[in-house]
């Protein structure tokens, strides 16, 4: 098959990005390859309501050397809370450049976190141990970076999981 160079105008691409069809939005995004695209259009892809469009946009940005700005479904409070083994609570700060998926009152995920405090202890040591794998550890001062962060809206996908209040974490 002989592919022709995409000559779709930026105005057509912008209109397609407003379509209710995910397939049309993905096709519009793919039409941007090799074009000089304004940052506001890129942010529209990254803020799309469909996680598949957001993920494709991130891949396109990475492929073209465009820094991906943080896309957040919520702005977390200054400190967030993660429940760990033995009822230990890890207190963390989510940096401004972290990707975040979730909503208030539910478990959330971030691509980055900085551990600020450990409430409680594990057999006398101030450490948080992940409930999920019972292997990942968290110490005060750790900077957590999730390399394979998933931009989907799935609550239990990859990421640093947290709650926005200490009470929610305790009750988890």
Image (spheres, grey):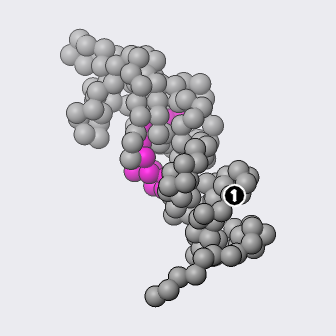
Residue 47 sits above or below residue 162 on the image: below
Residue 136: image quadrant is: top left
Whether residue 11 can be seen here: yes
Residue at image x 52%, y 61%?
Answer: 56
Residue at disc 1, secondary structure = loop
Chief secondary structure of the magenta span?
Answer: loop
**Which one is nearer the viewer's eye here, 7 or 129?**
7
Residue 68 sits above or below residue 123 on the image: below
Residue 91, x across and y down, in percent:
45, 23
**Which one is nearer the viewer's eye here, 75 or 19?**
19
In the rendered image, the residue lying farthest to the right is 11
Residue under label 1: 37
Left or right of 57, for residue 160:
left
Residue at image x 75%, y 67%?
Answer: 10
Residue at image x 33%, y 24%?
Answer: 138
Residue 121, x across and y down, in percent:
29, 16
Image quarter where the C terminus lies is: top left
Residue at image x 29%, y 27%?
Answer: 137
Q: Which residues are magenta?
A: 149-165
Is 104 inside the magenta-drawn segment?
no
Residue 127, x across and y down, in percent:
30, 19
Left or right of 82, for residue 58:
right
Residue 143, x across and y down, in percent:
42, 25
């Amino acid at each position: 098959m002989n592919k022709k160079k995409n000559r779709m105008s930026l105005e057509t691409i912008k209109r397609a990005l407003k379509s209710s069809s995910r397939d049309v939005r993905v096709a519009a995004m793919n039409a941007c390859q090799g074009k000089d695209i304004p940052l506001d259009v890129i942010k529209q892809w990254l803020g799309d309501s469909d996680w598949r469009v957001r993920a494709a946009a991130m891949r396109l940005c990475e492929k073209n050397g465009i820094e991906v700005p943080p896309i957040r479904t919520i702005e977390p409070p200054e400190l967030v809370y993660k429940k760990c083994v033995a009822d230990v609570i890890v207190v963390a700060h989510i940096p401004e450049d972290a990707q975040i998926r979730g909503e208030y009152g539910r478990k959330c995920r971030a691509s980055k976190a900085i551990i600020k405090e450990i409430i409680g202890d594990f057999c006398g040591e101030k450490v948080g141990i992940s409930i999920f794998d019972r292997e990942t550890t968290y110490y005060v001062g750790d900077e957590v970076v999730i390399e394979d962060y998933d931009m989907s809206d799935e609550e239990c996908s990859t990421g640093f999981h947290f709650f926005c209040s200490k009470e929610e974490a305790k009750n988890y």
